[in-house]
Amino acid sequence: MENIVVSLSFRFQDISSSGSNSVHSMQVCTEPKVILSTDDIVSLIGNKCDGVIGQLTEDWGDTLFGALKKAGGHAYSNMAVGYNNVDVDAATRHGISVGNTPGVLTETTAELAAALTLAAARRVVEADDFMRAGKYEGWLPTLFVGNLLKGQTVGIIGAGRIGTAYARMMVEGFKMNVIYYDLYQATRLEKFVSAYGQFLESQGETPVHWRRASSPEDVLKEADVVSLHPVLDKTTYHLINKERLALMKKDAVLVNASRGPVVDETALVEHLKANPMFRVGLDVFEDEPYMKPGLGELSNAVVVPHIASASKWTREGMATLAAQNVAAKLKGWPVWSSPNVEPFLDEIKPAPKAAPSIINAKALCLSSMP
Ligand SMILES: NC(=O)C1=CN([C@@H]2O[C@H](COP(=O)(O)OP(=O)(O)OC[C@H]3O[C@@H](n4cnc5c(N)ncnc54)[C@H](O)[C@@H]3O)[C@@H](O)[C@H]2O)C=CC1
Ligand SMILES: O=C(O)C(=O)CO
């Protein structure tokens, strides 16, 4: 009998009908309290638990991995692609695998970043408030004038899966040029923009272009819109600070759907106050669930509560991948080595007998397939 603790209630797909004789017992936490503390999770783990699916709001460090190991556990998965809340070295020391859920969030998160870009650039939330307050007296040439995106430059910091998907949306949708900064070359993105530029030219339209920047500063100075999509680690903590904000255009749009601490939010509040034409769209906050003082009162900030991955398809996909990460480890199955996780989402064909994404697979010497 295997016990798995799931620290949030959601529709859970059957992971136990995969041909093995072992029986899984699954406890889905349905506490009305939605954010669990470390103590809550320790008591949910109890003294017999084989694996846990946890959330990005939880602090998965030595205490929790120690408690899981003591309860006989050896598998953990974040129900998220980002895992800055997980001390992977601590998990490895305890012999526990750490899964995450890449790929199924890419387009959903990029779409919300695009929505925040438009909302901020075209002042959608301010205008909606104005309308509901009964202040609209008739069309005016000067009412809620914002920024046109077409032909401008979008800057991407962190051009991985989500950064690339967002860039493509802005290129295809608004014919924006791209400047990006990443530690690695975004070859797929470069090829796409080049090919799309050639297509536009063949239609007699102005082509789009891309440029790989040599520093974040380069992006911030040149771009009209900057969207942040890097991982959160020591290299990206407060990547956007007072000095770098000062480099941006006075009427630029900044979007953050990565992690709150990538931006020094206190510096951002001061920048927004001093530059009323500068606008931000924020899905994530430095001290979630709180905003830094003053941010909530600023009309040049659009703020939403970390909903970038909140589409039904994505949330079901995240749950499926997280469950399969844990179940596969408990069954001793190998780790999926392809970035394509679609085979795990097929509702007709059985899922591959593999763990979709294990971060410390190498450190734990887990075998891989295909
Ligand atoms: N707001 C939300 O609901 C969501 C937020 N996220 C966040 O987005 C992040 C990115 O997700 P993916 O695109 O799937 O990951 P990814 O791993 O494909 O992309 C991250 C990119 O950041 C780059 N990077 C790392 N350090 C950097 C640095 N110092 N400067 C510039 N770039 C750097 C990497 O080279 C990589 O290309 C996640 O780690 C997570 O924190 C992800 C999904 C939903
Ligand atoms: O997957 C992630 O990293 C998230 O932030 C989920 O929304």
Image: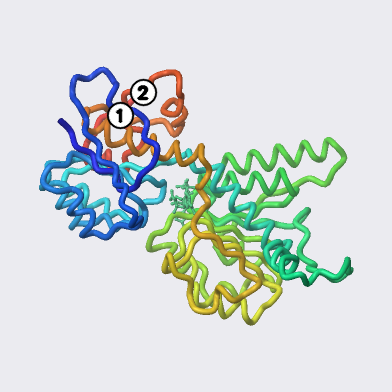
Res 223 seen here: no
Single out the mark in the foreground, 2 or 1: 2
Q: Which residue is mark 1?
A: 368
Task: Identify the residue at image location x=27%, y=39%.
Answer: 362
**What amino acid type should be assigned to the residue bearing mark 2?**
Pro
- Answer with mark 2 or mark 1, whichever residue precedes in sequence: 2
- Residue 277: x and y in percent read 71, 73
Q: Nearer the viewer, residue 184 or 236?
A: 236
**What amino acid type should be assigned to the residue bearing mark 1?**
Ser
**In which quadrant will I find the N terminus?**
top left
Q: In which quadrant of the rendered view does residue 53 lie?
A: top left
Q: In which quadrant of the rendered view does residue 64 lie?
A: bottom left
Task: Identify the residue at image location x=69%, y=56%.
Answer: 118
Q: Crowding near pointer 2: few (<14 within 10 Å), some, many (20+)?
A: many
Above-or-below relation of 368 to 292: above
309 to the left or right of 176: left
Above-or-below relation of 171 to 155: above
36 to the left or right of 25: right
Asked which secondary structure carries label 1, the reply is strand
Q: In which quadrant of the rendered view does residue 186 lie?
A: top right
Res 138 seen here: yes
Disc number placed over residue 352 in the picture, else none: 2
- Residue 257: x and y in percent read 53, 56
- Residue 310: x and y in percent read 51, 47
Above-or-below relation of 108 to 273: above
**In which quadrant will I find the C terminus?**
top left
Q: Crowding near pointer 1: few (<14 within 10 Å), some, many (20+)?
A: some
Task: Identify the residue at image location x=43%, y=41%.
Answer: 102
